[in-house]
């Protein structure tokens, strides 16, 4: 298979597995934390060349679940008021917290956005109108499930 076809396939797999290409997610973190890609790789616990390969689509996935967990931890920290303030000390503290973390990844605490994966799966099997209608049927007894169906039914 030609290189550009492999990259396209890997990026498509990243969209399916992670909701979007990993390059997009990593670039947002580089900007949010004002760090180099190499520095971010160190925080995540992955080599800089490996991170580059994942970002460019030459590799499809992050093989180490702890690295993925740290990536998600950083994405969540961006949403905190301290980090969102952009203060250098808050950014550094957040990076150090993640660098020093020892995430344990088990079936019970998968660090992935299950909601996003579920939404993508629902969109593949049902139309937006059907998802919205199903949400209405579940509102009274299962409001969280209804909310997930409603989110999946929204047109992008």
Image: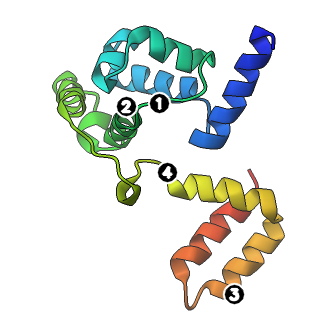
Per the model, the C-alpha gap separating discs 4 and 2 is 15 Å
In the image, residue 24 above or below residue 154: above
Which of label 3 and label 2 is nearer to you? 2
Q: Secondary structure at mark 1?
A: loop
Q: CA distance from mark 1 to mark 4?
A: 17 Å
Which residue is located at x 61 percent, y 30 percent? 21
Does 46 sit left or right of 131 as displayed?
left
Q: How many marks?
A: 4
Mark 3 or 4: the one toward you: 4
Q: First in sequence: mark 3 or mark 2?
A: 2
Q: Earlier in the sequence, mark 1 or mark 4?
A: 1
Q: Quadrant of residue 44?
A: top left
Residue assigned mark 2: 67
Q: Earlier in the sequence, mark 3 or mark 4?
A: 4
**Picture quadrant where residue 147 is located:** bottom right
Place of residue 30 in the rendered image (x, y in percent of width and height, measured from the top left): 41, 20
Mark 3 and mark 1 in contact? Answer it, CB < 8 Å.
no
Horizontal and vertical percent for residue 150? 66, 69
- Residue tagged by mark 4? 113
Q: Nearer the viewer, residue 14 or 64?
A: 64
Q: Nearer the viewer, mark 4 or mark 2?
A: 2
Above or below 144: residue 81? above
The label shown at residue 63 is 1
Q: How is the image coloured?
A: rainbow
SS at mark 4?
loop
* Spatial CA span between label 3 and label 4: 25 Å
Mark on residue 137? 3
Please state which of residues 107 and 31 is positioned toward the viewer in this rendering. Answer: 107
Would you call the spot at circle 2 few (<14 residues within 10 Å), some (14-19), or many (20 or more)? some
């Amino acid at each position: 298979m030609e290189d550009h076809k492999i990259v396209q396939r890997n990026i498509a797999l990243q969209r399916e597995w992670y909701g979007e290409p990993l390059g997009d997610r990593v670039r947002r973190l580089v900007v949010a934390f004002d760090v180099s890609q190499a520095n971010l790789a160190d925080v995540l616990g992955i080599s800089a060349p490996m991170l580059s390969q994942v970002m460019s689509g030459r590799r499809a996935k992050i093989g180490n679940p702890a690295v993925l967990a740290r990536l998600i931890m950083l994405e969540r920290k961006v949403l905190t008021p301290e980090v969102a303030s952009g203060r250098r000390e808050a950014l550094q503290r957040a990076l150090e917290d993640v660098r020093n973390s020892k995430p344990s990844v088990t079936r019970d605490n998968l660090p992935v956005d299950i909601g996003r994966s579920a939404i993508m799966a629902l969109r593949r099997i049902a139309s937006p109108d059907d998802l919205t209608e199903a949400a209405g049927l579940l509102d009274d007894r299962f409001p969280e499930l209804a909310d997930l169906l409603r989110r999946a039914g929204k047109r992008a």
